[in-house]
Image (spheres, grey):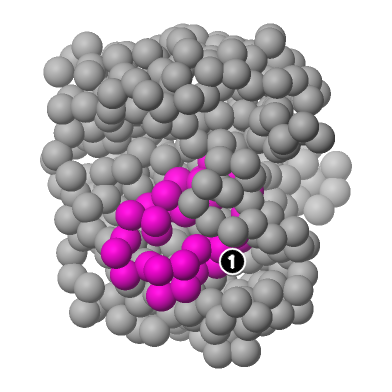
Amino acid sequence: MKALVLGGGGREHALVRALSLDPGVTDIHCAPGNPGISELAENHVINVTDGLAVTELAARIRAELVVIGPEAPLVAGVADALRERGIPVFGPDREAARLEGSKAFAKEVMEAAGVPTAKARVCRSAGQVSEALDEFGAPYVVKNDGLAAGKGVVVTDGTTVVPLQPAQDFKRAYDGDQGPNTGGMGAYAPLPWAPAGLVDQVMESVVRPTLQEMNRRGTRYQGLLYVGLALTSKGPRVVEFNARFGDPETQVVLDRLATPIGAVLQATDTSGLKGIGSLQWKPGAAVTVVVSAENYPGDPVKGDAIGGLDAANAVEGAYVLHAGTSWSGARDVVSSGGRVLSVVGTGADLARARESAYAAVSRIELRGSFHRTDIAERAAADL
C-alpha cells in the first residue's frame, strides 16, 4: 500500500520507520516531515490541519492509508474530510477526538461509562473555579478544557479493540523527576514492574466501557485511544485520554512491535481489526532518550547545527529519530524545536537497551542541549 503520514516530529519518524519495515507498504509520503523522515519518505509541505489540502495530497499520490500523527488535525476534522473522500485513515473523526480535545467531554463520558477517574468539576468563570477549589481542598489540579499537546494503549475500529504494549514516559525536564513538566524526556517498554493483568484490567474497566458509551452516543471511535493512567492503591485511575499515538512512547512501543503495522492501522478504518487478531511483540526492551534544546521547555534555542548523527546511528542496537529538526540553507541539519531528537536503544533487557541509548546520545553534538540520564534507570536496576 501507499501510505501518507501527517506530522513532522519524533512520533511521526517512528511511524514512518515502522511502515518502512512493513513489506506490505511500498511507498511512503509524509507532510511536512523532517530531515530524518526524508531518508524514508517523500516529504510534502502543506497545512496538515487543512482537510482540503490533505485530501487533495492524498488523492494525488493515491494514498491507501493516511496516518494522522498530531492531535490538531484530528480535532480540526481532517479524518472526517478523508473519510468523505473514501480514503482510509488512521485516526478518529472530529467528534470522537473530543475525548482529547475537551477534558470536560472526556470526564462526562467517563462518568457515564463508570470509568475510574478523579472527581472533576467543570468551571466557566473564575468564581466557579474558586468555589470548586474550596470544595475539593488541596491537592488539586486545574486543567484547560482544550488541547494541551500531551500521549498509546489501544487501537480500535469502533467495535474491536487491540491492546498495545504499555510504556512509561518521563515528563519532568531533569533527573530525579525535577524541573518543569515537558512533553516527555524519554520512555521505555516493556514495564517489568507492571501488576499482573494490568492490560486486561484497563481494557475491561476503561477502554471497552468508554467505547460502548461513545457508540451509545452515536460516535464511532476509530484509531488509537491512549489511556494515561495513575496506578493507585485502589487500582488504575484515568488521568486523561489522547486520541493519537504519544510522544515519546510511540518510539519504544513501535520498536517492540513485530506485527507489520500497515495492515493494522488500515484495519481500524475498515472494521477489520477482528481479522488481525492479537499483536506480536519482539523479545527484549527499548529505551528512548530525548535530546532537548537549550532552554526547553521555555523558549528553546533554535538554528544550531547538529553533529554526530551518523556516529550515533552506528552504535549497535541504537538509532536516532528526528523530532525538532530542519535543514539550513546549506542542507545541514539544525535544531528547530524544543525536543530535537529521540535516541532509541534496544537490547535483551532494559539495562542493555539503556546502554545502547546512552552510548548513542553521547555521540550527539548540539550546543547547549541536555537530556535526562535516568530514563528507565530504576526499572533496569530492579530486574
Observer able to see residue 292: yes
Q: Could you tell me residue 312's position as x and y percent? A: 44, 21
**Residue 208 horizontal side relative to residue 57, left or right:** left
The image shows residue 125, relative to residue 4, as above or below, that is above
Rendering coords of residue 37 (x, y %): 55, 47
**Number of residues whose C-alpha sits closer than 10 Å to that of mark 1, classed few (under 14), some (14–19) or many (20 or more):** many
Where's residue 204, x and y in %? 26, 61
Residue 186 visible somewhere in the drawing: no
| In front of the other: 112 or 164 | 164
Q: Which residue appears at 58% of the width and 49% of the height?
A: 38
Q: Is residue 365 magenta?
A: no
Q: Is residue 127 left or right of residue 38?
A: right
Residue 369 against residue 46 in the figure, above or below: above
Magenta span of residues: 1-30
Q: Is residue 184 left or right of residue 18?
A: right
Where residue 323 appears, as percent x and y from the top left, is: 59, 37
Q: Secondary structure at mark 1?
A: loop
Q: Which quadrant holds the N terminus? A: bottom left
Count the numbered circles shown.
1
* Residue highlighted by disc 1: 97
Could you tell me which residue is drawn at 23 percent across and 78 percent down?
Answer: 274
User: Residue 378 lies in what quarter of the image?
Assistant: top left
Q: Which residue corresponds to the image point at 40% horizontal and 69% vertical from the top-left?
A: 26
Q: What quarter of the picture does the C terminus occupy? A: top left
Residue located at (53% from left, 18% from top): 308
- Determine whether 269 is above or below 282 in the image: below
Question: Which is nearer the eye, 223 or 159?
Answer: 223
